[in-house]
Amino acid sequence: ALSIGPIQIYWYSVIILIAIFVAASIVYYEMKKQGVTGDDFTDLFFNTVLFGIIGARIYYVLFNLSYYLENPIEMFEIWNGGLAIHGALIAGIIYVYLFCRKKKLNTLKILDMIVVGVIIGQSIGRWGNFFNVEAHGGITKSIFRMGIIEKENYIEVHPTFLYESICTFIIFLILIIFQK
């Protein structure tokens, strides 16, 4: 997306930051309505995102352990990619649970408020796969296809990232409707 001297800013990270901002805005609004203080929201959201990133990296490394055991310094090179949403969710839920215990908040009620942000964040975040030309399906001639260049060959594939983005957006709308 952008280069500032030796620093590279990739579209995927821009999309993820947009997803985090949108999610934070929605969760903040709901938590404010439910009486959670701004300080508690800030501590909870910032640390949950931080733990989520760490969990996403650990999960990715564990599922590619043989590679990282041969290249241990690369375990910490998060800028080279390698995050898994499953690890982010696991670490985030653990942090939310511990935070709620410490603050004497109802964990399930807080998770109910957060899940709406997670779902819209996932819907937006999937577009990072578009910019990275990844997370697409197999070759197709369907009307639902997108063209990509893979190994210097033009192919048309199912845009599975788009399918997931649409589905998670629909789930987001359903959650917003029934959140009350």
Image (cartoon, rainbow, N blue to C red):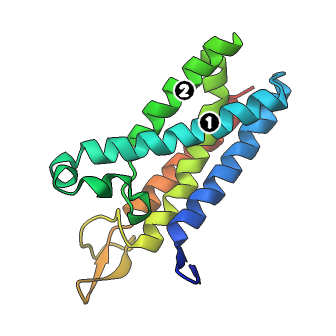
**Disc 1 on helix, strand or loop?**
helix
Other residues around mark 2 within 10 Å, as few (<14) / some (14–19) / many (≥20): many
Residue 137's spot in the image, x, y percent? Answer: 29, 64
- Is there CB contact under 8 Å for labels 1 and 2? yes
Write down the quadrant of residue 41 in the picture: top right
Q: Which amino acid type corresponds to the residue marked 2 in the rendered image?
A: Tyr
Residue 53's spot in the image, x, y percent? Answer: 49, 45
Mark 1 or 2 closer to N-term? Answer: 1
Residue 162 in view, yes or no:
yes
Write down the quadrant of residue 138 in the picture: bottom left
Tell me the quadrant of the picture where the N terminus can be found. Answer: bottom right
Q: Residue at x 30, y 56 (%)?
A: 73
Q: Residue at x 24, y 73 (%)?
A: 139
- Residue 80 placement, left or right of 61: right
Q: Name the foreground residue: 166 vs 100.
A: 100
Tell me the quadrant of the picture where the C terminus can be found. Answer: top right
**Disc 2 on helix, strand or loop?**
helix
Q: Name the foreground residue: 53 vs 126.
A: 53
Q: Dot 2 corresponds to which residue?
A: 95
Q: Which amino acid type corresponds to the residue marked 1 in the rendered image?
A: Asn
Q: Residue at x 70, y 28 (%)?
A: 179
